[in-house]
Amino acid sequence: MSNKDKSDIENEQVESVQPEAMDVEEQQAEVLSTEEKLEVELKQEKDKFLRLFAEFENYKRRTAKERIELFSTASEGVMKTLLPVLDDFERALTHIEDDKEAEELRKGVLLIYNKLVSTLEQKGLKVMEVNKGDTFNADSHEAITQIPAPTDDMKGKIIDIVEKGYLLGEKVIRFPKVVIGQ
C-alpha cells in the first residue's frame, strides 16, 4: 500500500473513531441528563409528599378541634329548651316568696330549682353576669327596649334585666335581655 492509501485508511479510522467518541459523549450526556431528570423528579415528589403530609396534619388538627367543640356543645339544643323552664322556676320562686302561707311549697320548689341548676351547671351551663348599672354592650346584651334614664349617669346603661343570659362552655346560647336608659 502506498502512503496515500495508508493515510486514507487512517483518516477513515480516525473519522470512524470520532463518531464513536461523540456517541459515547452523547450517551454520557444523556445519562447525566437522565440522572438530572430523575433528581428533579425526586425533588418534585418529595415536595408533593411534604405538602400532602402537612395538609393531612392540618386536617387531623382541624377535625380534632371540631370534635372537641361538638362534644362541648352537643347538649346545646337540650339546654336551649330547658332555659324557659328555668325562667319559669325563677318566676314561681319570686311569686311564692310573697305568699307566707306557702312556705313548704316554696321549700320544695326551691329544692327542685337548685337541683336543676346544679345539674345544668355540671353540663357546662353558666349564667352571664349582668348587673343593673352596667354599660350596655350590643355584642353581649340584647336590648328589648329603651326608656328615659332616671338620671344622666344611667344613659346608655342597663336599667333592668328582663331575662338572664347563659353560656354553654364559652359559647353564648342566650343573650341577656335588658332594658337600657336613653
Image (cartoon, grey):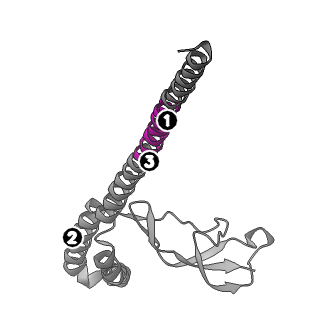
Q: Crowding near pointer 2: few (<14 within 10 Å), some, many (20+)?
A: few
Location of residue 27 in the rendering, given as x and y in whole percent from the top left corner: 47, 32
Which amino acid type is marked by label 2? Answer: Leu
Label 3: which residue?
48
Location of residue 152 in the rendering, given as x and y in whole percent from the top left corner: 80, 72
Compared with 63, 112 (above or below) is below
Q: Crowding near pointer 1: few (<14 within 10 Å), some, many (20+)?
A: few
Between 113 and 94, the residue placed more toward the observer is 113
**Is 77 left or right of 44, judged from the image as shown?**
left
Label 1: which residue?
30
Q: Secondary structure at mark 1?
A: helix
Location of residue 120 in the rendering, given as x and y in whole percent from the top left corner: 28, 67
Which amino acid type is marked by label 3? Answer: Lys
Report how far apart the C-alphas of labels 2 and 3 lie in the structure: 63 Å
Which amino acid type is marked by label 1? Answer: Glu
Is residue 27 found inside the magenta-colored segment of the image?
Answer: yes
Bounds of the magenta span? Answer: 26-49
Contact flag, marks 2 and 1 (Cβ < 8 Å): no
Label 2: which residue?
111
In the rendered image, the quadrant that contains the C terminus is bottom right
Residue 167 falls in which quadrant of the image?
Answer: bottom left
Viewer-nearest of discs 1 and 3: 1
Compared with 6, 57 (above or below) is below
Q: Which numbered disc, 2 or 1, marks the residue that appears first in the sequence?
A: 1
Residue 18 falls in which quadrant of the image?
Answer: top right
**Is 31 left or right of 111, judged from the image as shown?**
right
